[in-house]
Image (cartoon, rainbow, N blue to C red):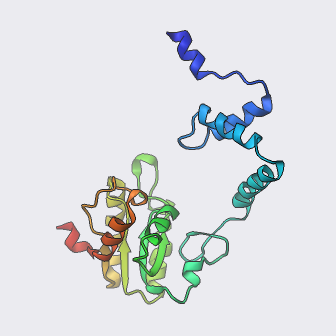
C-alpha cells in the first residue's frame, strides 16, 4: 500500500526542463502535479509563437503592473480607469479587501462609485495588523476629499468583522455615513463567490453600520 502511495506521489520525468516546468505550475493555488503536467504538455503542443506570447504576458504582468495611487486597485496606469472616470460617483467610496472584490462588484452593474482596496484584512493569527493594510490612505482620502458615504464591503468572516469594526472606529469622527452590505446572503462569507444578482442586491440594500451591529 505504501509503495502504491509513493508511486502516485512521485513522477518520473524524461526531461529536466519538463520537470522544472511542472514544478513551477504546481506551485499555483489548486494545481497538483498531474494538472501541472497536463498544462505543460498542452503548452508543448501549441505553436512556439503562442507559448512565447503566453510567457511574455506573465513576465510583463509582473514587471509592469501598477497599483492605483488613489484606491490601490491593480492598474496599468498610476491612476486606474475607475478613479479617472468622470461617470463615477467619487463621493461614495466602497472599501474592499482586494482586486477580486472590485471585479465581483463591478460585474453586478449595480455600483457606480469609487473604491478603496485595503490589500487584505486584519488577522492577528496571520501577523497582519492595521499598519500592513492601506488604512491610513483611506483615512487621508476621507479627511481631504468630499465623501458622502463609505461602504464597508468586506467578507462576513471573523477577520472581515474585525477590520470593519476597526475602520468604523477610525472613520466615525468624520461625520460621514458608514454603511455595510446586507448580511445573510449565502456566499460563504467571501465576496468573490457571490453570484452577481445576490451581491448586487446586497449593495443596493446596504444598511448603516450602527444598524447592522444591533
Please, is residue 34 above or below residue 136 in the view? above
Q: At x 42% / y 71%, what residue is drawn?
A: 108
Q: Position of residue 139 (x, y in %)?
A: 44, 76
The image position of residue 201, as x and y in percent, is: 31, 71
Residue 187 seen anywhere in this rendered image of the structure = yes
Q: Residue furthest left?
A: 214
Q: Would you identify the image quadrant in which residue 13 lies?
A: top right
Using residue 185 as the reference point, say whether residue 40 is left or right of it: right
> Which residue extends farthest right?
48
Residue 39, by quadrant, is top right
- Spot occupied by residue 181 in the image (x, y as percentages of width and height): 31, 70
Q: Nearer the viewer, residue 52 or 128?
A: 52
Q: From the top left corner, tell me how far across and down residue 151 is, in percent.
A: 36, 75
Question: How many numbered marks are there?
Answer: 0
- From the viewer's perspective, is 72 left or right of 110? right
Q: Quadrant of residue 44?
A: top right
Q: Is residue 129 left or right of residue 73?
A: left
User: In the picture, which quadrant includes the C terminus?
Assistant: bottom left
Q: Nearer the viewer, residue 12 or 149?
A: 12
Which residue is found at the position 53% from the left and 41% from the top? Answer: 30
Residue drawn at the location 57% of the way across and 34% of the way down: 32
In the image, residue 48 sits, relative to residue 2, either above or below, namely: below
* Residue 169 can be seen in this image: no
Amino acid at each position: 500500500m505504501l509503495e502504491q502511495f509513493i508511486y502516485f506521489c512521485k513522477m518520473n520525468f524524461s526531461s529536466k526542463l519538463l520537470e522544472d516546468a511542472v514544478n513551477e505550475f504546481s506551485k499555483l493555488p489548486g494545481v497538483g502535479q498531474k494538472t501541472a503536467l497536463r498544462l505543460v504538455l498542452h503548452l508543448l503542443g501549441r505553436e512556439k509563437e503562442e507559448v512565447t506570447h503566453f510567457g511574455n504576458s506573465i513576465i510583463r504582468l509582473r514587471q509592469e503592473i501598477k497599483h492605483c495611487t488613489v484606491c490601490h486597485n491593480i492598474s496599468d496606469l498610476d491612476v486606474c480607469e475607475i478613479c479617472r472616470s468622470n461617470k463615477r460617483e467619487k463621493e461614495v467610496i466602497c472599501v474592499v479587501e482586494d482586486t477580486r472584490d472590485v471585479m465581483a462588484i463591478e460585474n453586478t452593474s449595480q455600483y457606480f462609485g469609487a473604491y478603496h482596496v485595503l490589500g487584505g484584512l486584519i488577522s492577528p493569527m496571520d501577523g497582519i495588523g492595521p499598519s500592513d493594510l492601506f488604512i491610513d490612505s483611506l483615512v487621508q482620502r476621507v479627511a481631504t476629499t468630499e465623501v458622502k458615504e463609505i461602504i464597508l464591503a468586506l467578507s462576513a468572516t471573523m477577520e472581515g468583522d474585525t477590520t470593519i469594526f476597526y475602520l468604523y472606529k477610525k472613520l466615525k469622527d468624520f461625520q460621514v455615513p458608514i454603511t455595510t452590505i446586507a448580511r445573510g446572503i449565502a456566499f460563504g462569507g467571501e465576496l468573490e463567490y457571490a453570484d452577481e444578482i445576490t451581491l448586487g442586491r446586497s449593495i443596493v440594500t446596504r444598511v448603516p453600520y450602527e444598524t447592522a451591529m444591533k
